[in-house]
Image (tube, coloured by chain):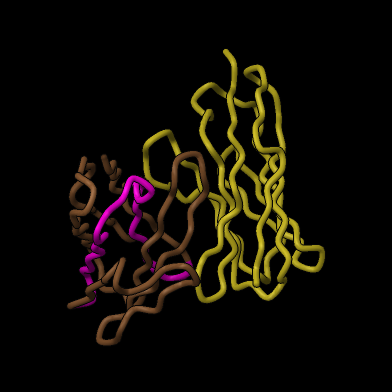
Chain colours: A yellow, B brown
Amino acid sequence: KQEVTQIPAALSVPEGENLVLNCSFTDSAIYNLQWFRQDPGKGLTSLLLIQSSQREQTSGRLNASLDKSSGRSTLYIAASQPGDSATYLCGTSYDKVIFGPGTSLSVIP
Amino acid sequence: SAVISQKPSRDICQRGTSLTIQCQVDSQVTMMFWYRQQPGQSLTLIATANQGSEATYESGFVIDKFPISRPNLTFSTLTVSNMSPEDSSIYLCSVRYGDTQYFGPGTRLTVL
């Protein structure tokens, strides 16, 4: 049974800092891994999708990496902004998406 | 991409009643998923709904409590039956379109 964990559970940083969010999973038999953003009381927005055959994906200030053999993914956010404040969820996909508990990010102006 | 809408966006219901949540997708998709997000928690999959077959429920979720309909490739409903305060959550509809998972805006349910 796939289990997904995320570290840290919460993170508070000053504006402009670079930061890394971590995601770990127990079963490497995944189809892909997605990073999502969730604003309070809202649905999920897909940020990046990494196929199981890929090592990383980039979109603007976001870079996500995937190491299937070690069961790890990281989301790197460069030059953080207050608008980045949200909960970030990773989800592994095979026949369904299994989510981690999320990292609550607060970027202080 | 796929755009998903849900109705209602929120509701406050009395204990013992039922609520049906609708999910509409702007593209035809084979698989639709229903998730629950309890307060302060991550998302938990309730069931997978394929058109033309019965929904597949995850451990801890049963059809009598969460009946699902999937009449066509763009629409699904989830009913939360005989509600109790423990059912207060955000319920999200999701689809896989291509390789990407998309989510609706969610239905925020409060049970008094």
- Residue at far bottom of view: B53
Above or below A56: residue B95: below
Return the residue nearer the eye: B65 or A101.
B65
Q: Residue at (22%, 65%) from the top-left corner?
A: B77
Residue B75: x and y in percent read: 21, 68
B50 displayed left or right of A32 = left
Q: Is residue A22 left or right of residue B87?
A: right
Q: Is residue B90 magenta?
A: yes
Which of the pair A77/B66 is nearer the observer? B66
The magenta stretch is: B72-99
State the image coordinates of residue B7 (x, y, percent, origin top left): 19, 51
Identify the residue shown where x is 66% and y is 58%: A4
Q: Is residue A52 magenta?
A: no
Q: Position of residue B65 (x, y in %)?
A: 31, 66
- Left/right of residue B76 with respect to residue A18 in the rendered view: left
**Is residue B24 or residue A5 the one in the foreground?**
A5
